[in-house]
Amino acid sequence: MEHEPIPQSPSAKPNNGCSSRRERSKQRKVKKRLTLAALLYLLFMTGELIGGYVANSLAIMTDALHMLTDLSGIILTLLALWLSAKSPTKRFTFGFHRLEVLSAIISVLLVYILMAFLLYEAVQRTIHMDYEINGDIMLITAAVGVAVNLIMGFLLNQSGHLHSHSHSHRHSHIPQSNSPNTGHSGSHGHSSLAVRAAFVHALGDLVQSIGVLVAAYIIRFKPEYKIADPICTYVFSILVVLTTVRILCDTGVIILEGVPRHLNVDRIKEDLMKIEDVYSIEDLNVWSLTAGKTTAIVHLQLVPGSSSKWEEVQSKARQLLLNTFGMYKCSVQLQSYKQEISKTCASCQSSSA
């Protein structure tokens, strides 16, 4: 029996209503907060680099390097929010979401290059010990760093209160989105999670800045313990690696079009098979356009005699993928029942004879 492809129904666009205007207003506020946070990070990071250079302190410059990773995260979030509003083109039919992934890779590589240079200098200082550190400048810069991170934590915490409801995805430097079926919801998810993630990283920066302040205090009043400076560089470099390796793993999975770690393909198949009138799953592909924007294509075969119910089956499958598994987009292809016919090729027949 030849299978007949079943016509596909167009996706119905959700009605955003007046809530769309409210969410856009909230999103603008979040963008302003994140932009302000990015400017503060940039200004103080530049100040730390200058202060670290003048004080001849690698610890201060490594602290600035760690701040660069958080600045990159905020910039990637703003980029993602901007890209989410861009319409696909005839050439880029999926939109420009992968630009976010490419930007993440470039920023991490830049951080690693700078970190390698600082580690090399720290090793040289540890071996030769022929350096002097200006304890006063180091202490002042470290103290300002603690103050700036306190301000950042307050700023981002207040911003996070704008979006404190109904979100439970994991944090990542690549901003997550929990939009099940609308680009608008995706922007909302980006905003909420990005602000909360930035707040968590600001707290991490605060702890690190306190560590630099302690080292600066030791070096200022006990110059013979200047080894504390390269030791801080080693410790902070490990922290930088720990906070960036997740980015590389996530971007690698996205570029290779792998299944996101929070989804289980077997579970998706099991739930699809529970839909009434589904006979088999011919094919299922799940991948991400970028972090938090998961796409799926599924090819289902209907049980015999149920071709007339294709719209109902398709609707249930779409609801499952969009609402239950939080897909950003999905395509459900259906076909009528096709009986399996065992066909043995001529070479196999001859070999078995």
Image (spheres, grey):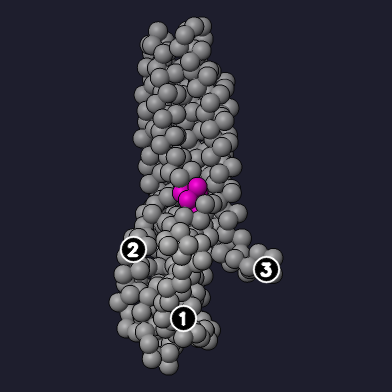
Instruction: Name the residue rendered at 37%, 62% in the picture.
Output: 265
Q: Nearer the viewer, residue 265 or 232?
A: 265
Disc 1 is placed on an element classified as strand
Instruction: Name the residue rendered at 48%, 78% in the picture.
Output: 333
The amino acid type of the residue labelled 2 equals Asp
Disc 2 is placed on an element classified as helix
In the rendered view, does 319 fall on the left or right side of 117? left
Q: Which residue is mark 2?
A: 266
The amino acid type of the residue labelled 3 equals Thr
Using the numbered discs, state the Cα–Cα distance from disc 3 to disc 2 in whole angstroms. Answer: 34 Å
Which stretch did the figure color magenta?
250-254
Provide residue 351's location: percent of width, then percent of height.
45, 59
Q: Which residue is mark 1?
A: 334
Extreme-right residue of the structure: 91
Provide residue 256's location: percent of width, then percent of height.
52, 52
The amino acid type of the residue labelled 1 equals Leu
